[in-house]
Amino acid sequence: MSEFDRAAAEDRAILRELAEAVREIAADPAENEDKIRFWKRHTGLRGERPAVFVFPDGSWDELLPWDSLRCSDPAARSVENELRRRLIRHRYIRDDVPITAEVEVPKAIRNTMWGLPPKTERLPGRGAYRMICVIEEPEDWKKLSPPVVTHDEAQSRRDYEYIADAIGDLVPVTQVGVKKFSFHLMHWYCDYRGLDNMLADLYDEPEMIHEVMRFFTDGVKSMLRQYEEQNLISLNNDRTFHYTGGVGYTDELPAPGFDPNRVRLCDVWGAAEAQEFAQVSPEMHEEFVLQYERELLEPFGLNGYGCCDDLSAKLEGVLKIRNLRRVAVCPWADVAKFTPVLKKNYIMTWKPKPMPLAEREFRPELVRAELEDGVRRARGGVLELVLRDTHTCQSDPARFGEWVRIARQAIEEQWT
């Protein structure tokens, strides 16, 4: 047996063991079908209670380090990683996310984005970095180029056949294209210009900002056309993480006239955010970024907006987004300012503080106090609790399960 054949056999054995374990869990209706039905009611604004969702973010580096994976083939490692994450979620987290058995193999899609990679300087601490300005003069923006999308069909076919041959008899294996559509116009601006410079540019170079926003907007629209023309869009009305928060399950997508052989933008979720504008006025938020984001989100079937910035004073413009369904409520925003405005017409994607999970000593009383207060303030609206940005859990995955337990207790005691 050659070295390649030996590695393939080992990959196959690893994936089959994991697929069997996930399939067994997914067979339980309480872990799969019931939760899917719950999410569809929730995203349809008719849920009976708030949803609870944990996205470990950087803590995955502790719970499942990349170098701990055993498969050698890149496609197999990606599937191994996903299956192990589902098992970890089932064992430790037990939130409202379904444990499903299907395996998705992504198509080999390349995207040049803006042609010029940003420059960063890593700083002490986990994940901290500083952007290095590469745009010194307005003319420097010409260094960027619009996105070019290509698809390596041969690689896609190889990856799919490799995974389907290994586990296709155990679990459904499908090939998927682009499923995540989130747009970060001001983040891209700061990638090249820097945050401090961006804030100064609002006063000193307003026309330059508009020109760059138009360049990014037209570039994204071109990218989306390329996705459509190459038939690279896949449905995301499933367990796909929706950028603003929560997962994508909904019975409102795909849109009427759906052709399963050619997914359209109106069949999928989209999202945008401008958290770099956290300290910028509603008027400037509208002028310099929100009007462009609304243009980008126009064709999508359902949309979410926001991230880690307080949108409570900017809701008038945000609510003009077509097909808006989710609105982010960041950890330092007052939930009570959103409830009377959003009512039961939109989902409040509330992101409580992740800090208690990152402390050396876990203090559940901090979690309980915040969640009870937030849930109480959200009564009268549609709420989902999303734990994100947990870049460390001190290598203690049980903290996530405890957070979920406290969240559910707060909902039981404070929601009705």
Image (cartoon, rainbow, N blue to C red):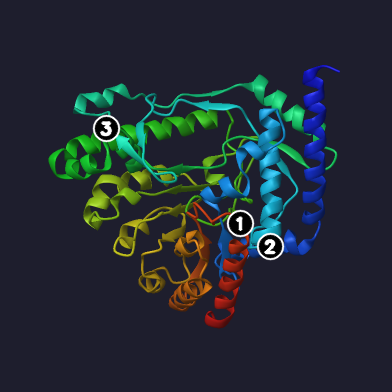
Q: Which residue is mark 1?
A: 250
Residue at the spot 73% in from the left edge and 58% down from the top edge: 32
Q: Quadrant of the N terminus?
A: top right
Rendering coords of residue 244 (x, y %): 47, 54
Q: Which residue is mark 2?
A: 35
Quadrant assignment, res 108: top right
Residue at the spot 66% in from the left edge and 41% down from the top edge: 81
Rendering coords of residue 323 (x, y %): 46, 54
Q: Mark 3 near mark 2, Cβ–Cβ under 8 Å?
A: no
Question: Which dot, 3 or 2, sits closer to the camera?
Answer: 3
Residue at the spot 47% in from the left edge and 67% down from the top edge: 345
Q: Mark 1 near mark 3, Cβ–Cβ under 8 Å?
A: no
First in sequence: mark 3 vs mark 2: 2
Rendering coords of residue 387 (x, y %): 52, 60
Q: Which residue is mark 3?
A: 133
Measure the C-alpha gap from mark 1 to mark 3: 41 Å
